[in-house]
Amino acid sequence: MLNTKTITDLKEGYSKGDFTPADVVKTLDKSIEEKDGEINAFISRDTEQALEAASKADTSLPLGGVPIAIKDNINVIGEPCTCASQFLKGAYKAPYNATIINKLLAAGAIPFGRANLDEFAMGSSTENSSFHKTKNPHDLSRIPGGSSGGSAACVGGDLAIAALGSDTGGSIRQPASHCGVVGFKPSYGRVSRYGLVAFASSLDQIGPLTKSVTDAALLTNVLAGHDPMDSTSLKIETPDFTQGINDGVAGKKIGVPKEYMDGDLHPAVKEAVQSAIKALEKEGAEIVEVSLPHTKYCVPTYYILAPAEASSNLSRFDGVRYGNRSTDVTDVLSMYENSREEGFGSEVKRRILLGTYVLSSGYYDAYYIKAQKVRTLIMQDFTKVFQVVDAIIAPVSPDPARKIGENDGDPLKEYLADIFTIAANLAGIPAISVPCGTASVDGKELPIGLQVLGPYLEDQTVFQVARAWEALYQD
Ligand code: GLN
């Protein structure tokens, strides 16, 4: 079936003339028709447009004729970009392409399908979408993770070949882990954020969700690179991320953080990560126990800084410049108030309130500045460890995908489960989730991800270690 293929498979099939990009789009469309009624990974799609692009695709290009699903917080010119929010529903069409969309198009890719997400990317379950809840393709009673839950579910459910997501505190890696796919967050500054609707600008990165580590590297080759439209994008050469990807781990030093493995881990997650550690050791990696002593401060630090930045970024949604305006308006203040009251869902409001609080005078020093200082300590934890090891391996999520609705009314419990993914964003370092086993729960096999983290800008090392594990796992 063409919908189960990787990017690498498509490239080979196109070059041999086995099938065409239009065949792939049609097969994906059919499987979306058949399965997305239940999975609900997509917010929208334009099959006609994708078929038109497929008919003209130049398959000699790096991603020629490869359909890619796009998280619905990335601007594609002329298309709605809803961020799964009532604020933007039916009221906004992108007037420009995100830089990464221009890069995808120049590489011959076909954007196909807009993937569901937690509203404005705030969440870890995709339950915060104001449109519909996406379900885990491995068990429809469970969450796909989030916030890029639609992107992970469409790749994991074979409704897409690959997808783009955004990762502010784990939003690519955690859903990838829950849906049994690969999800990569590049080093901060590698990939332009221009045209990504900002959540927390110092943490956000766009990245790929794919069916293989090599596919993630291939997509990152296209996404990465300096963009004058994003002042945080780095002016550095983009290496070929596939280079050395099959070189294995012999002689590599790999750290395992004791704070992660000693924590509250589901037994199946612990076992899967430990068996990956053993297998990599057998391949010649040197495994070293390391310490990231500020781990326990990651969640509180993130949940001060991310809402602070979000409260500022989301101030642009005022009913004047973007999106829906309330009709219940008597004066300018009630226009702002009622538009925001009606437009935002409860999790987004909670983040805005939290963020406004920690930035307000009197609390700014106690919370925001303090959290910035702790962020530096968290970064330094990694700098120290990476003086000794080449990469770190860790769990992605403490538990396999939970039931839909299980954490309703308990945001703290939900936030605490972000413990293993947040640090990479606070430190700006690259990290990937790669499938590493399953947990048998209620008669279903729920995917578990292994996280590989590398030093800042050592994205290639992350791919290499992840690929080494993937090769062992697939055998
Ligand atoms: N779960 C985290 C949050 O809700 C991360 C979200 C993300 O990476 N976009 O903030």
Image (spheres, helix red, strand yellow):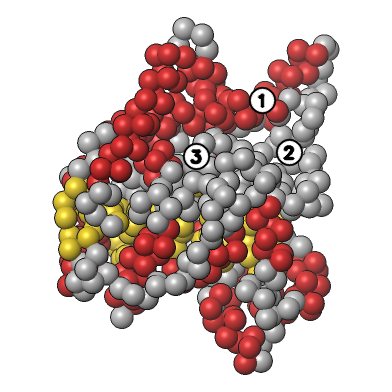
The image quadrant where one finds the C terminus is bottom left
Residue 370 placement, left or right of 266 = right
Q: Nearer the viewer, residue 444 or 217?
A: 217
What amino acid does circle 1 point to? Ser
Q: Are marks 1 and 2 in contact (CB under 8 Å)?
A: no
Residue 11 visible to the viewer:
yes
Judging by the rendered image, the residue that carries numbered circle 3 is 203
Whole-number angstrom distance, CA of label 3 to CA of label 1: 18 Å
| Disc 3 residue type (three-letter) | Leu
Label 1 CA crowd tier, 10 Å (few <14, some 14–19, many 20+): few
Secondary structure beneath dot 1 equals helix
Disc 2 residue type (three-letter):
Leu
> Earlier along the polypeptide chain: callout 1 or callout 2?
2
Residue identified by numbered label 1: 315
Q: Is mark 3 within 8 Å of ligand 1?
A: yes
Give the alpha-carbon distance from disc 2 to disc 3, as whole Å: 23 Å
Q: Which residue is mark 2?
A: 88
Camera-nearest residue between 330 and 232: 232
Instruction: Say which label, 2 or 3, has the lower sequence index.
Output: 2
Q: Residue at x 37, y 60 (%)?
A: 462
Residue 85 on image: x %, y % = 66, 39
Q: Are marks 3 and 1 in contact (CB under 8 Å)?
A: no
Q: Position of residue 353 (x, y in %)?
A: 54, 20
SS label for mark 3: loop
Rendered position, 121 above or below 174: above
| Residue ranking furthest to the front | 236
